[in-house]
Image: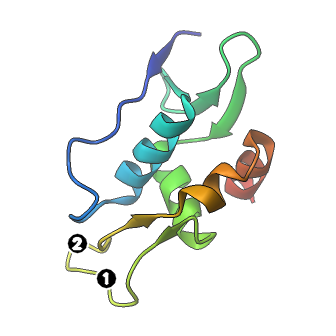
Amino acid sequence: MRLTAIDPPSRSFSRWLTDEEVGQVLAASRGWRLAADGRVMAGTLRKTRIAPSLAALGATAAAERWVSRPAAPGSDGSGPTHMMWGVFNARTDAEIAAKVAA
């Protein structure tokens, strides 16, 4: 299985970020990779599936409050996003994968 590097989105965090872009930021910060079928994978030798997609990772991050969005989202349904790096980085890969799978 060939994995490709995930780069953070080109848009600023002060603008509107979709769930996929939030997942992209979080995955890039952890050095996770993207499989050909869109799954987010951790590790290079022992590959661990973290999420089925970047959008699923972003949606879980919002639900688990690893990111903060205002109560009234903007017209595109996302909203300005603030990353809570300490909260996210305190989680292990296994914890994150379990939360996304739940």
Farthest-out residue, bottom: 72
Q: Residue at x 20, y 49 (%)?
A: 11
Left or right of residue 13, residue 23 in this image? right
Q: Which residue is mark 2?
A: 76
14 shown above or below 89: below
Q: CA distance from mark 2 to mark 1?
A: 8 Å
Amino acid type of the residue that numbered disc 1 sits on in the rendered structure? Pro
Left or right of residue 97, residue 30 in this image? left
Quadrant of the image for the N terminus? top right
Q: Which residue is mark 1?
A: 73
46 shown above or below 33: above
Disc 2, disc 1: CB below 8 Å? Answer: yes
Residue 98 badge: none
27 shown above or below 35: below
Q: Residue at x 59, y 61 (%)?
A: 60
Amino acid type of the residue that numbered disc 2 sits on in the rendered structure? Asp
Q: Position of residue 82 (x, y in %)?
A: 40, 67
Q: Position of residue 49 (x, y in %)?
A: 69, 32
